[in-house]
Image (cartoon, coloured by chain):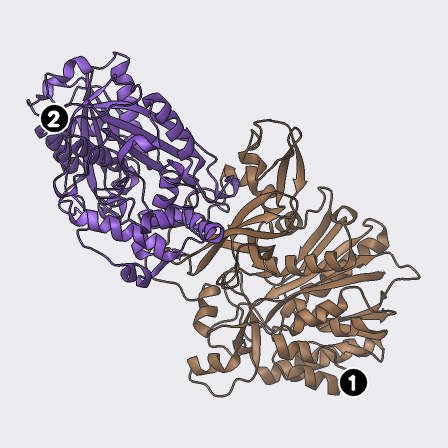
Amino acid sequence: MALLGVGVGVPSWRLAAGDIATAWGGRGGRGSIAVCGPDEDTLTLAWTACDALLAETGASPDDIDGLWWGTTRPPFAEGPSWSHLAATLRLGPATVGAVTAGSPHAGVEALLAAADAIAAGTVAQAVVVTSDALLPGTGTTLEPACGAAATAVLLGPATDDAPAVIGPRAGRWMPALDRYRGDHEDTTRDVYDGRLFREEVFLPLATDTASALGTDSRWSLPDPDGRLGGALARKIGTDQVVSADVRKALGDTGAAAALTGLVPALTTPGAAALLAFGGGRATAVGIDVRAAVPGAERAVADLAAEGTPASYAQVLRARGQLEPAGEHVEMAVPPGSAMFVRGNAEILGLVGGRCVDCATVNFPHSIHPACLGCGGDKFDSVPLSRNGTVQTFVINHAMPAPFVAPLPLVCVDLDDGSRVMFQGEGTGAELAIGSPVDLVLRRYAIERGVPVYGWKVRSR
Amino acid sequence: MEGALEVTGNPWNKVAVVGAGLIKMGELFDQGFEDMAKGAYDAACASVDHGIDSSAFDGVFLATQRGTLWGQEGIAGNTVPSAIGLSGIACTRIENACPSGSDAFRVACMAVASGVHDVVLVIGVEKMRDKSAEEGLLARAASGHPILTRGESAPVLFAPFATRHMHEFGTTREHLAAVAVKNHHNGALDPYAHFRNEVSIDDVLASPPVCHPLHLLDCCPQTDGAAAVIVCAPERAKDFTDKPVMVAGFGLATDHPYLHEKSTFVGLPATVLASQRAYEMAGVGPSDIDCAEVHDCFTITEILDIEDLGFCDKGKGGPFTADGNTALDGSIPVNTSGGLLAKGHPIGATGIAQLTELWWQLREEAGDRQVALRTGYALQHNAGGRGSGVSVVNILNRV
């Protein structure tokens, strides 16, 4: 099975572990973790990783017929997570695949399911994306360790010139409680007893699995708390832990950790392996890297990006764990309503209607039965460009909850000649008329409990 | 002849305005929607020189836009006649965004000119402050299309024009501030204005940001208010007054509503179209206008208006204002009442309150705000809706 490319998505904020410790009166807290801003989650991170993957490999959505997504936090615990991601990637209507969830082991489950589908010949080319943004209980020892990130890889049938090939796999399991969240619970609980987990669950199971794979490799190893990874490396007897720097920079990225930690190994040829752990399961997969994998260099750089420092209060608010008192202003259109059924696909896919008479692009098409330019009523569906320049912009400072100021709103002239207006990312400090910008997928709201997605304008 | 007016053009003159009045604008916590309507109706009736009785009216056109703010959005057309003592009369509610009042006036004029109605009350009423600011205009940030308009509170509809106007023409925040300074000066002279204080350029520049590049004093307040005018057929006018003001012409135009659909961010095409229609109907041009009440919901809006209405060249609105051309003693006084910025913007009432100011100006009853009349034409303008997708211009003249 060929691994044809890689891309990553890293959230915009960094939270110093010391800030969490200070808030709870604790001591210490080293380093920082990557955390989602208010408009980011596992879907936007997954999209970011897939977008980088497609850009770096040059793969067309038309050539991809499988999408597997592993995450402990699908944005809809039960609902259309997979189809939302597929829509944002503009995948074809016959695309197959699955969301794997349930534990941090879900990432490797997605990888192997896709590989097996390709091996079986049911899928020609698949995107596998693993993303996570853990929501820990506030004040738990788990909290300063919980990071967020996404990594996507492109899989296809093995060929002689494939940059990397997925090799042997090994797995072990035991029915033991580790990191845990009940069906009615919002936040993930830490392990019951750290020593018990380390000595009787994690180290034996992971060591056994790595031994079963039986390779002398550059390893991407799980490291839930910042210490277990080192202990596991000593048990396995390796000093080639390629995941250590990523773990240090971002924290534990849950279901995304195994593939994300592997990224540095994809830049140079040699044997590599990942080990995923969670839900009482451990799985190891060998990867034979034959040449630098397309996208790996960019991915390493993206993983090392500094991010924007955020306060603990900002992070709690972004996670929905700190809410302003008073009433929220509801979205005028409920997310379950007909307007979303009519228009969601074209918003998520950023699809416009190009007039066959005058070529004006009408966006979104569903609210333009007559052409803006000439009044015509025959259109071709066209994917809009996601790059352009600023026509004009504002920065809104006065809005009621749940909005958070400052909120930029930006009108963009896209490179294909169409024009859109969307919210801007961040504070808008870099915005200027004529400056180059890109459109990125972000979460606009959690409305009546439903995540709502759209595009935001990001300064290039 | 002393005081004689040079009447130009070929005005429509099929409807006369014989009465006009309004209530003091402000945060009228002690008055309900019905109280305000009654106040405006009484004020308009009291302004009729020869007096008027409720039995004289045979129609009412009511303008109210955001009825959600007092909870009776759907049915104001039947609550208001009852509240003001005209129950039984034909009453139609007009909603057309910020120009609701202007459009109600226009529709009333068509009703009179058609001969269907004889003497019509045009009344605008808006309750903006029975709910908190957060539940009022700010809540617009969550209205409309769930993605395309997410975060679009009212200033977002105009601030992009300021950003672009500044970029293309070198318009400055000081130019914008000059609009607020002038209109607050005029408002200080208007006993009906919400704000009756002067502000300085520095006050405007130093006020807190609301929606970059607009700051607090670049924005109109949320104001309760009501206003009413009485229109009738010309042959009935002499029953009510010896000094009627005539309706010379009007125009309404629409434009694409969403901001990304706008063809320009340095002007409002609907205003250009509406004014062309009104000028043509009245047989006059911008240089024939003695004074104007225009839509200054934000300072940038007045800059756009005076360019789009033809009072100055495109791009020159900032310096034109800063140089005093639109002041009370300027070549084209604009917003002598204090405008939306100082008098206030009770949406459905706004256009009718503007018409009231012009009625006073053309009858030379505007007191300290009285401008020098040259031709006897005055222009009233509102623009609004999503992306200023609707604009109305009414032109009055003295005969």
**Is residue A349 something one can see in this rendering?**
yes
Identify which residue is drawn at 81% across, 66% down: A293
Chain whose colour in the figure is brown:
A
Chain whose colour in the figure is purple:
B
Circle 1 chain: A
Quarter containing the N terminus of chain A: bottom right
Amino acid carrying mark 2 in the image: Gly
Residue A250, how many percent across, how many down?
Answer: 61, 74
Comparing labels 1 and 2, the label whose residue is closer to the camera: 2
Identify which residue is drawn at 16% across, 46% down: B28
Q: Which of A119 and A149 is in front in this view?
A: A149
Identify which residue is drawn at 23% across, 19% down: B15
Marker count (numbered): 2
Identify which residue is drawn at 41% across, 39% down: B388
Identify the mark at residue A238; answer none if there is no mark.
1
Amino acid carrying mark 1 in the image: Thr
Q: Nearer the viewer, residue A53 or A170?
A: A53
> Which residue is disc 2 drawn over?
B85
- Residue A275 lies left or right of residue A427; in this view the side is right
Specify few, some or many for label 2: CA neighbours under 10 Å numbering under 14, 14-19, or 20 or more: few
Query: Relative to residue A203, is residue A456 depicted above or below?
Result: above
Q: Is mark 2 on a helix, strand or loop?
A: loop
Q: What element carries label 1?
A: loop
Residue A31, how many percent across, how many down?
Answer: 57, 82
Specify few, some or many for label 1: CA neighbours under 10 Å numbering under 14, 14-19, or 20 or more: some
Quarter containing the C terminus of chain A: bottom right
Residue B228, how many percent across, how many down?
Answer: 18, 31
Residue B339, how many percent across, how many down?
Answer: 25, 43
**Is residue B300 something one can see in this rendering?**
no
Residues under labels 1 and 2: Cα distance?
92 Å
